[in-house]
């Protein structure tokens, strides 16, 4: 194998790929298994005899021309058993402990038959093993930035390979089976929807335009530029709409606060009519229920008192009418004795009685008016409370609607920013 030198940003670096003397390599001291037997080993030995070593072992230098395995203990043991002199190897220099995940990925990456899709999945798996979570629409440029700090390939290489995982499964399968060029896949993966990707995949497969990567890139650049312009306009409209919603929200909150002030004032006004023990209640809805109960009781009391006063007024009015009739007869007939009982008529006493009854009627009517006033005041307070409460609830619902719209538009604008 020809010698190469590759530098890894952190962790370790590949020093060379070369054939090493088997005698100069020892099985890793960190591996508890130093002897490998059984059918699996025999199969491995037969494979090496017939096909050669498909995957080199990974070693590190421990002293001059002496090495220790990091991965490939069984392969080295098989070469020892077969009395072979040299073994294909990759020499690495480790700055820290090499994880099993790194070894697995490194061994995958040096395979000659590794397809771009397999390589992309290997990088993604490494990203997940670093404690990250998988997402449907993962940001492959971000993942490439992280992975390229840990492993040999460059940021651009990893980003391009990972971008293939954005493609629809059918396109991925075609690349995996080497029926579609990865370079075409890199370009169409930049499109925003699977429908667009499949459309261009079909166009390229039909080969009606004799596609080149440069021509494909130019067309997709035009599509993306048009979508960016469209997205920019939409974002501008949505941003303006969001600002209007925020302005309306501020105005609505001012109106709501005014209604809230009215509501509190009405609640305090209602408390004036409550009993001492009920005035301690703070919850407006509870005060409203107390008020409704008061109104019910008060209405019953007022109705009873009003009817009683009305009866009193009617009785007093009858007496006044009788006195009026008697005084009229006295005046018209110039009599001094009652024609019915022949008793003497005291006109002064009758007049005084008449005046007193009229005063009683007026007093009863005033009491009726007072009762009506009290009941009306209760009913007005109830109506004002209910009206203000409904207005306040409506204002709060409108505010909630504005807030929901703000959240919605912010999310849509964020999604446009990502695009």
Image: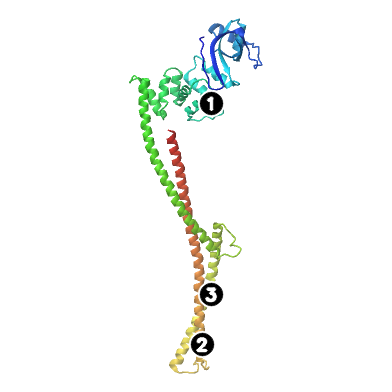
Is the C-beta separation of discs 3 and 2 under 8 Å?
no
Query: What x and y, as percent, mark residue 367?
Result: 52, 75
> Which callout, 1 or 3, points at the residue further toward the start of the chain?
1
Q: CA distance from mark 1 to mark 2?
A: 111 Å
Query: What x and y, as percent, mark residue 6?
Result: 51, 17
> Which callout, 1 or 2, points at the residue further toward the start of the chain?
1
Residue with the mark numbered 3 = 308
Q: Quick one: label 2, few (<14), some, or many (20+) residues within 10 Å?
A: few
Is the C-beta separation of discs 1 and 3 under 8 Å?
no
Element at label 2: helix
Residue 175 visible? The answer is: yes
Is the C-beta separation of discs 1 and 2 under 8 Å?
no
Q: Depth check: 181 or 380 in front? A: 181
Residue with the mark numbered 2 = 352
Quadrant (top left/top right/bottom left/bottom right) for the C terminus? top left
Element at label 3: helix
At 54% from the left and 72% from the top, the residue drawn is 305
Residue 310 visible? The answer is: no
Query: What x and y, as percent, mark residue 57?
Result: 57, 13
Q: Quick one: label 3, few (<14), some, or many (20+) residues within 10 Å?
A: some
At 35% from the left and 28% from the top, the residue drawn is 222
At 52% from the left and 89% from the top, the residue drawn is 349
Residue with the mark numbered 1 = 127
> Which callout, 3 or 2, points at the residue further toward the start of the chain?
3
Relative to 398, does residue 176 appear above or below in the rendering?
above
Is 214 on the left or on the right of 384, as rendered?
left
At 48% from the left and 64% from the top, the residue drawn is 380
Q: How many marks?
A: 3
Relative to 376, does residue 89 appear above or below in the rendering?
above
């Amino acid at each position: 194998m020809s010698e190469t030198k590759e530098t890894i940003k952190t962790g370790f670096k590949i020093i060379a790929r070369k054939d090493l003397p088997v005698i100069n390599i020892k099985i890793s001291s960190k591996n508890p298994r130093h002897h490998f037997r059984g059918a699996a080993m025999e199969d491995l030995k037969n494979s090496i005899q017939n096909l050669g070593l498909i995957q080199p072992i990974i070693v590190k230098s421990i002293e001059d021309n002496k090495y220790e395995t990091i991965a490939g203990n069984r392969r080295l043991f098989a070469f020892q058993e077969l009395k072979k002199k040299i073994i294909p190897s990759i020499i690495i220099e480790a700055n820290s402990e090499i994880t099993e995940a790194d070894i697995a990925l490194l061994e995958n990456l040096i395979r000659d038959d590794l397809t771009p899709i397999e390589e992309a999945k290997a990088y993604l798996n490494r990203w997940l093993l670093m404690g990250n979570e998988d997402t449907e629409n993962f940001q492959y440029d971000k993942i490439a930035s992280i992975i390229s700090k840990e492993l040999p390939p460059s940021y651009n290489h990893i980003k391009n390979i990972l971008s293939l995982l954005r493609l629809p499964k059918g396109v991925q399968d075609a690349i995996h089976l080497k029926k579609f060029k990865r370079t075409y896949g890199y370009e169409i993966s930049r499109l925003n929807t699977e429908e667009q990707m499949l459309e261009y995949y079909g166009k390229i497969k039909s080969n009606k335009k004799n596609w080149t990567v440069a021509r494909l890139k130019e067309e997709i650049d035009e599509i993306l530029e048009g979508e960016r312009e469209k997205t920019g306009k939409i974002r501008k409209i949505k941003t303006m709409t969001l600002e209007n919603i925020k302005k309306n929200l501020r105005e609505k909150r001012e109106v709501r606060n005014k209604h809230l002030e009215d509501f509190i004032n009405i609640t305090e006004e209602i408390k004036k009519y409550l009993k001492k023990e009920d005035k301690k209640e703070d919850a407006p809805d509870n005060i409203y229920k107390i008020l409704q109960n008061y109104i019910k009781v008060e209405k019953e009391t007022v109705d009873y008192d009003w009817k009683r006063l009305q009866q009193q007024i009617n009785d007093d009015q009858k007496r006044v009418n009788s006195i009026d009739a008697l005084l009229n007869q006295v005046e018209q007939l110039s009599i001094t004795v009652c024609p019915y009982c022949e008793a003497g008529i005291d006109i002064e006493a009758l007049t005084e009685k008449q005046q007193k009854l009229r005063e009683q009627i007026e007093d009863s009517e005033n009491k009726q008016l007072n009762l009506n006033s009290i009941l009306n005041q209760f009913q007005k307070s109830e109506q004002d409370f209910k009206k203000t409460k409904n207005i306040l609830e409506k204002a709060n619902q409108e505010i909630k609607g504005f807030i929901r719209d703000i959240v919605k538009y912010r999310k849509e604008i964020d999604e446009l920013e990502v695009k």
